[in-house]
Each structure stands twice: as structure tokens, then as C-alpha cells.
Amino acid sequence: MTSRRDFLQKITLSTAVLPFLNLNEATKTKKTSNESVDDRILRVAIMGLGSYGTRVAEAMRDCKKAKLVGVISGTPSKIPVWQEKYNIPEKNCYNYENFDNIKDNPDIDAVYVITPNALHHDEVIRVAKAGKHVICEKPMAVNAKEGQEMVDACKKANVKLLVGYRMHFEPKTLEIIRMRSNGELGKILFFQGLSGFTIGDPTQWRLNKKLSGGGAMMDIGIYSVNGSRYMTGEEPIWVTAQETKNNPEKFKEGVDETIQFELGFSSGAVASCLSTYSMSYLDRFFMVGEKGFAELNPATGYGPIQGRTNKGELTQPIVTHQTVQMEEMSDIILRDKKPVVPVDGEEAVRDLKVIDAIYQAVRKGKRIDLA
């Protein structure tokens, strides 16, 4: 991945320019007079101090271009623990009621929103209005309409909106994308995505539609939706889908247990995918073209990702996904780097449009064409 990094000319921000910058711009570009653009560190506050927020925080310990400097939590007891563990100053600690005040904090560049899905929309818009860049966990929103509103709000506030698509930076995944892009697999004919695990605690927020926006599709099925797009390099033009629900007590109305869905592409390629909360050991991508094949198994777990193609085993390095993600996102936000696979809000809206169509296909029992 280093070989794909852009070599940017080192520049310094003249102190003569600073008086003419508005507060948001000054915050987003803050550096010392002798600090080059390549030396800047993305200073991040994490919103949502749950299990995945902890995973991100731990991974950021190894980052060179990003640093955890703040927290936002609705659980007061968690904040002192994080302060001590990650050396976070009191002035960078907020709750869900007062975090709009980050607009006055020049020591925070971006907020990483890691809260239940249905909360993302309002939280991201509030962060944008405070003039901070936003990183949001996937799914970015519970539907494409809300997702587009988030994109529009961030554009209006002149801040960047990125989404936690960690697989877009994973080395074996990128190697398959490179092979496909270079024509080494030939014309792509078929993709299969299997995404599932057996979910536990029935009282957790993931099984509460008001917080999750759905069920397995929003949480785990999105990997196959997104994967079908970046693996084939195409956007689907139609969707079919069928839902199976064997445990309606656990999976209430609006919370999908298992959905099988198919996607069609303009090239003639098709994708056949499964999203489930009731079967484990499902984390596999397989793609076949006229000249070869590629497989990832596991494909999207925290690692190690393993893969092979018709040319043999993939030997790219095993990485900590969240560390690499945050390093790359620092480059995207601070240095305008263009990733191989987009991780911006527009990319997330494309996924949400497909998921909207999948749910619509389930309800109507027929194929749904995508505009």
C-alpha cells in the first residue's frame, strides 16, 4: 500500500494567511510554522466507547498519522477509564448533550462515530455543524435518504465524511481488485458473498429495529453488498431477495434473520449472496472470471484474512485493519489522498440504495430495478 501513496510536495502554512481563515478552516489545517503537510497527525475523538470503539482505540496506538485525543460518551463512568488509559485531557471529554462544544476545541480534527446505526444520522450532522471531519461506522445510516442528508450536511459544512470500510485497505482484498482491474481474471462472470454468524443476546441493540434499522442485512450483510461492488468493479442494476425467518420471537418485525439476495450487473455478471444471524462460519467471497478465480475465506473478519486465486495462495501481509484504516484516513482527510476503493459518504449511499432495494424486493416478492 505504501507504493500507492501519493508523493506530495511539502508545504508550510504562512502565518500571514491565518488571519484570513475562518475558524473551521484554521482548525482543519492547524500545524506549526515549520510542520509540513506530510507531518500532520489526524487528531480523533471517538464517539461511542463500546467494544468496537475500544478495538479502534487499541489499534490507533500503533498509528503514526492518527492519534486518539478525545472521547464522547453517554456513560460517565467510562470516561475516566479512557482518560487514564489513553492520556486524554479533561477538556477533550464530552457527553451526548454537550459535544456540540467541540466546535470551540482546536485540538480535535475529526470525530469517529461508533454508535448504534439509527443514531448515526443526527450525530454525524451535529459533528459536521461543529466544523469537524466525520468518520462514521457502517452502515452509515438506516436508509439511503438519511445517508444522502448526511452527505449533504457535511458538504455544506465543508468537512469530509468517511465511513469505516476497513476492508477497502486490506492487502489481500486490494490484490484481488488489482488483478481484476488489470484483466488477469478476464471478464467477471459470478460473485458469491456469504456473511453470517449466530447472534447471541436477544436484548442487544442489534435486534432492536429502532436502533439497528434492520437485522443481519444492516450489520453483516452489508459486507456482501459492498464486496460485490468492489470485487466486480460494477454497480448492480437489479436486485432480487427472499427472507427466511425461523425464530420470530428473537427476530421481531423489521429485524431480518436471514436474507438471500441476488444482484445483476450491466456486464451480465451476477452475484448470489447470503446474510444471516442464524448460521456461523459464513465469511467467504468467491469470484470467477473467464480467465481465473479469486477467493477470500475469511473475507471480512478481523483477521487473519486468507485468500487464493487460480495463480496460488495470496501472501500479502496480515495487518490490523483498524490501524491501517486510520492511517489511510489521515491521508485522505489531511492530504486529499484518493484510495483505491472509495470510503466516502457517497460510497456508503450506494450501499444503502442496494440495501433499500433488497428490503423492497423482500416485501414485494419481485425483482427491483436500480436507477
Image (cartoon, grey):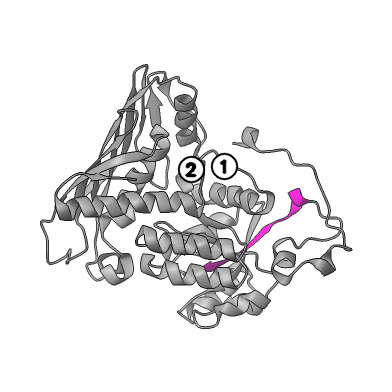
* Mark 2 residue type: His
Screen quadrant of the N terminus: top right
Q: Amino acid at mark 1?
A: Pro
Circle 2: element type: helix
| As drawn, 237 above or below 202 | above
Single out the residue that lies furthest toward the front.
371
Q: What residue sits 46% from the left and 31% below the top?
A: 177
Apparent side of residue 363 relative to residue 164 in the rendered image (left or right): left
Q: Nearer the viewer, residue 51 or 140?
A: 140
Give the residue pinned by disc 2: 168
Towards the viewer: 366 or 134: 366
Residue 125 picture location, percent across and down: 51, 69
**The magenta segment:** 37-46
Question: How far is mark 2 from mark 1, CA to CA?
Answer: 8 Å
- In the image, taking residue 45 as reference, residue 165 lies left or right, namely left
The verdict on residue 43 being magenta is: yes
- Asked whether the residues under the numbered discs 2 and 1 touch, taking CB atoms below 8 Å apart as contact, a structural biologist would say yes
Q: Quadrant of residue 10?
A: top right
In the picture of the structure, the residue carrying the numbered disc 1 is: 339
Q: Quadrant of residue 232?
A: top left
- The numbered mark, 2 or 1, whose residue comes first in the sequence reads 2
In the rendered image, the residue lying farthest to the right is 16
Badge 1 element: loop
Quadrant location, the C terminus: top left
Residue 190 position, x and y percent, is 29, 29
